[in-house]
Image (spheres, helix red, strand yellow):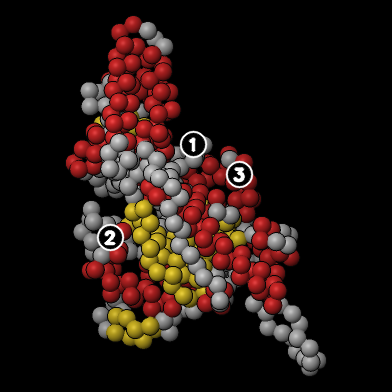
Amino acid sequence: MGPSDHILTSIEICAGAGGQAIGLHQAGFKHLALVEIDQHAVETLTENIKLLEEWSWEREYCDVLSEDVNKFRPVPSDKHPEDGLKKPVKFLGGPLKKRELDLLAGGVPCPPFSHAGKQLGKDDERDLFPRMLALVEELHPKAVMIENVRGIKDAKFEEYRTYIEARLQGGRAKRPETGLEEDFKGLGYEVCEWEVLEASDFGVPQLRPRAVLVAIRKDVLGDLKFVWPTATGGPQSVFHALEASMDLRYKPYLDMGGDIAETAKERLKEWKRKAREAESKKDGGIAPTLVGGSKKHGGADLGPSRAKAAWKQLGVSGMGVANDYEEGKKKKTQGRDLFRLDGPMLTVEQAAIIQGFPLNWKFSGGKTAQYRQVGNAFPPPVAAVVGKAIAKVLHAAHERDKETKVEPRGLLPGQSAPTLADSVDDRQRAGV
């Protein structure tokens, strides 16, 4: 069995609408569970897994859980034998065991560290790093991947980052609850740094720097090395990303003839002119960072004044999110959506293109709920390149440990050699 036959499993918390899940899926990971508290995002995950053929494995073996991650218990215990994953039992041949999972991933909430917020960090009730660390201890997966905003790399959070690293790999750090320094034993991981990856380096037509932490269990890493992905080429412009979808949005009005067709022709031509012109500028015509906002703040738009100004340079109005054709026709919002002098507003589908979602991935809920799912997502292409880098290490470790798993001679009756790949073998015997 070669590396291509070695199935890698993952669990993702704070899964949102699936940005990270899609990327890790593209990297070859099979999801045992996706955990998300927002009901609209859960419906998005459920419906896409149900309908898309490429997600047939997850349809059979993945639990999509609508619950608070603080209440998520993936492994049964003596105290709570009813806990644990359900559908993955068919694949695993029994309940998930400690050390059996390949990857635990999560885009834990960013507001505690975002430059757009108060940056309360550990003092923010939305900080889920403690829960992530508790799950690492409970599951002891081979690898851990945590995504957050660039703000977590700010100097003011250095102590908290050091604490997280110490919990994973050992070292001296201040415990957040007390502020007192301690020597932490660690959980047996090697932290492969916090790397800031820029989405536009990986084909996403958007300025979206994200901080990513990768940690790999020391017994798995051994003599192997994790290598961070490097840029895959020049940035993709908004014009290149949205040209086809803009043509489709204006086509029904162009086909009508008369004055409305002339107006549509002028507006489409003007958008193309501005978007093409932006390509020649220093940033290559890519979009500013999409922001999803929160339920506490009004409807959806494309961000603060500075972001709106950047969108205007791209020929797009950032004052809101447009209805699709059918909804616009029903609500008579075509003038607002497409024919404004400062340019068309983006639809949810176009925002998803800017975020790097596949065209066949659909979003559930109303327009504002859908846009928030898109705006808060981790771009799938970025998750994919990090996932592939992790998968490369895990596949190499699997092959290395298969080769070294040789029964030594001279064992006394009843003795057996320790192995590094028991959980992998158990999973293979479960029918893969």
| Sooner in the amino-acid sequence: mark 3 or mark 2 | 3
Q: Position of residue 342 (x, y in %)?
A: 23, 27
Instruction: Name the residue: 29% across, 14% down.
Output: 263
Question: What's under tag 3, amino acid-wise?
Answer: Glu
| Sooner in the amino-acid sequence: mark 1 or mark 2 | 2
Where, by quadrant of the figure, is residue 357 drawn? top left
Neighbours of disc 1 within 10 Å: few (<14), some (14-19), many (20+):
few
Q: Nearer the viewer, residue 60 or 71?
A: 60
Where, by quadrant of the figure, is residue 420 drawn? bottom right
The mark found on residue 54 in the picture is 3
Rounded to the nearest angstrom, the CA distance separating label 3 from label 2 is 35 Å
Q: Secondary structure at mark 3?
A: helix
**C-beta proximity under 8 Å, tags 3 and 2:** no
Mark in front: 3 vs 2: 2
Question: What's under tag 2, amino acid-wise?
Answer: Gly
Instruction: Name the residue: 56% across, 61% down.
Output: 391
Q: Secondary structure at mark 1?
A: loop
Q: Quick one: which residue is furthest to the left in this view? A: 305
Instruction: Name the residue: 49% across, 36% down.
Output: 359
Residue pointed to by mark 2? 151
Q: Quick one: which residue is furthest to the right in this view? A: 413
Residue pointed to by mark 1? 359
Question: What's under tag 1, amino acid-wise?
Answer: Leu
**Can see residue 131?**
no
Q: Nearer the viewer, residue 390 or 17?
A: 390
**Can see residue 92?**
yes
Instruction: Name the residue: 49% across, 79% down.
Output: 188
